[in-house]
Amino acid sequence: CEPVDVPLLADYIERLITEREEGGAGRVMIVDDDPELLEHYGLVLEGGGLDVRRVNDPATILGVLSEFRPDIVLMDMQMGRFSGINLARMLRFDPEWLGLPIIFLSSEEDREFQVEALSKGGDDFLTKPVSDAFLLRAVSVRCYRARQLDKLASRDSLTGLLKHSLAKAEIQKEHARCLRLKQNAVVAMLDLDHFKQVNDRYGHRAGDLVIKGLASLLRHRLRKSDIIGRYGGEEFVVALPDCPIENARAVLQSICDQVSQIAFNGAGQEFTVTLSVGLAPLDQYATSGDAIEAADQALYRRKQNGRNGVAA
Ligand code: GH3
Ligand code: MG
Ligand code: MG
Ligand code: MG
């Protein structure tokens, strides 16, 4: 067994702890038909702070993937009537699992065979027998990188806010949560007013700066627990957990007021913009989609009735 590089290991563990504080430890799914090996790998990775799911029967991996949603998969290559290569190939047919890192664990040292396996959908190889220290480090770094990538991919590049699909998914979770806890929560749709004119008069780059500025204002004015997404071009969606609708109305009205006072620059001129907002009580609808739709209708009413303000 190779010696463990203590400072490096400490660094990985520190990262893992930070990751855990930011929303859970890295999740690893191990698929192996040998129960003893499976248990051994599981204990090593759990000992390093990872959240592990052991899969002894390869036939069950699809169900486990959907439920556990691992950051990476460690997969044995020979598992009775199942081959790791075929399982990896099958997973790559589903866009949902296209980016999931799959690391093969195999005693097969033949390079041609390894290349073949990688070409069918695997990302890397660990050759058995693998030392505990190496396994933990190899899996931890890959897990860390997968999570970083995932985080980047879920953020809009201009504003750093959640992208449409992830914002919707987070609001769906919040909807379930507020019903369970019998709390109130509010969903808001925000849309910049006459934004086409802003681009036409002051240029697209100035328009981009307005969108970025509004995103930054929302981040500063709302709570850390609030969900903020860029829904479309100049449209944003916000969910405010544990918040009565009157409070949400006051906060968003004050954000509208603040937005209208910011001096932007474009095409050599100073200009201001305004914002319209529609609100709906998230906990009063059967689905989060219905609540978002209601907030959108409230936004439409506000647009009809003069813009620059909030409607519920
Ligand atoms: P309304 O008050 O009714 O919302 O009018 P509007 O002009 O804002 O409405 P509309 O939805 O017709 O136009 C939105 C415009 O926002 C169109 C598009 O050029 C602009 N836009 C969308 N995404 C971006 C972006 O990323 N950057 C910039 N600069 N402009 C964008
Ligand atoms: Mg095996
Ligand atoms: Mg608009
Ligand atoms: Mg719009």
Image (cartoon, grey):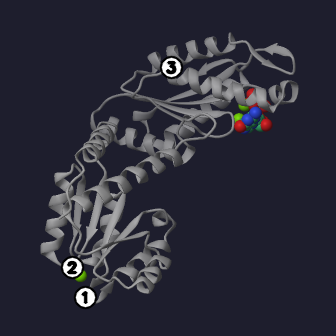
Q: Amino acid at mark 3?
A: His
How far apart are the two marked residues, 1 and 2, measured between alpha carbons?
A: 7 Å
Name the amino acid type tagged 1. Answer: Gly
**Position of 312 relative to 165 (above/below):** above
Task: Choose mark 3 or mark 2, whichever is in front.
Answer: 2
Disc 2 residue type?
Answer: Asp
| Residue 192 relative to residue 69: left or right | right
Which quadrant holds residue 199? Answer: top right
Are circles 3 and 2 on residues that touch, CB within 8 Å?
A: no
x and y, in percent, of residue 245 in the image: 45, 21
Instruction: First in sequence, mark 1 or 2: give its number.
Output: 2
Q: Is residue 82 visible?
A: yes
In the image, farthest residue toward the bottom: 81
Residue placed under numbered mark 1 in the picture: 80
| Earlier sequence position, callout 3 versus callout 2 | 2
Residue, disc 3 = 220
Residue in the picture at 42% in, 23% down: 223
Q: Position of residue 131 (x, y in %)?
A: 21, 66
At numbered mark 3, what does the secondary structure look like: helix, strand or loop?
Answer: helix
- In the picture, the quarter occupied by the C terminus is top right
The N terminus, quarter of image:
bottom left
The disc placed on residue 33 is: 2
Q: Residue at x 45, y 65 (%)?
A: 97
